[in-house]
Image (cartoon, helix red, strand yellow):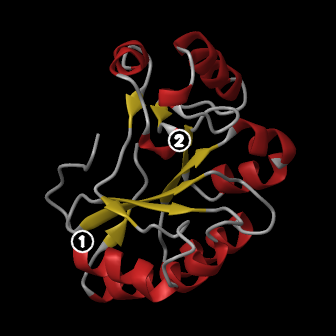
Amino acid sequence: IWSIKTKKKEVFLTFDDGPIPEVTPWVLETLKAYDAKATFFCVGDNVRKNKRFYQMILEQGHKVGNHTMNHLNGWMNFNKTYFENIGLCKELVDSDLFRPPYGKIKPSQIIRLKKNYRIVMWDVLSKDYDADLSGEQCFDRIRKNCKPGSIVVFHDSIKAEKRLRYALPKSLEYLKQQGFTFSSIS
């Protein structure tokens, strides 16, 4: 799934790599301020270490998805290892949504995973993880590329934090002014 067909003016915000105490609570507060729902693609090891923040995501009405136990790159791992890692995450993250870390996934992995998961990609990438970009540049990527049904990727991670703290509120404010609502992927 690269985007979602909708007749409404809505976008689907997603957050990869958390939950972590340094960023996820701030993301949740920011989303709440804009009455925004989102989908969090959680790394199982982060859920294991930060169960409280994972529960906060669910309690606030957001959706979750599997992002492997240890953020594995599908291209760089044998299928057996990759599927086992996804299975470990599934023990902690109850969801039929899956996003491959780095967007890297082999055709053979897609074929097998499609039996049990909806593989969620994106059509708008903030690139908040890229240290060569500014928060303003990340926001510009959102502003210029969002359309009804867009799936937008942010990261609730230390690596992305500086750019995320600038780009997320600016994006929410801008998109709200344009008449968009924010939904989770069901």
**Disc 1 secondary structure class:** helix
User: Mark 1 highlights which residue?
Assistant: 145
Q: Is residue 32 left or right of residue 183?
A: right
**3D distance between C-alphas at marks 1 and 2:** 22 Å
Which of the two discs, 1 and 2, labels the residue nearer the N terminus?
A: 2
Q: Secondary structure at mark 2?
A: helix
* Amino acid tagged 2: Pro
Mark 2, residues whose alpha carbon is within 10 Å: few (<14), some, or many (≥20)? many
Q: Which residue occupies the foreground of this view, 147 or 161?
A: 161
Q: Is residue 89 left or right of residue 167?
A: right
Q: How many marks?
A: 2
From this viewpoint, which residue is outermost toward the left? 7
Q: Is residue 107 left or right of residue 26?
A: left
* Type of amino acid at the residue the image marks with label 1: Asn
118 shown above or below 136: above
Q: Residue 76, how many percent across, how many down?
A: 54, 28
In the picture, residue 10 is in which quadrant?
Answer: bottom left
Quarter of the rendering containing residue 73: top right
Give how far across and how far down residue 75 sits, in percent.
47, 29
**Mark 1 Cα-neighbour bin, 10 Å: few <14, some 14–19, many ≥20:** few
Question: In which quadrant of the rendered image does the C terminus lie?
Answer: top left
Which corner quadrant of the image does residue 112 belong to? top left
**In the image, residue 94 lies at what x, y percent?**
62, 30
Q: Residue at x 50, y 78 (%)?
A: 168
Q: Is residue 86 above or below residue 1?
A: above
Identity of the residue drawn at 27% across and 46% down: 2
- In percent of the image, x 76 and y 58: which residue is there? 20
Q: Position of residue 130 (x, y in %)?
A: 53, 69
Marks 1,2: beta carbons within 8 A: no
Residue 101's disc number: 2
Q: Nearer the viewer, residue 80 or 25?
A: 80
Please tell me whether mark 1 or mark 2 is closer to you in this view.
2
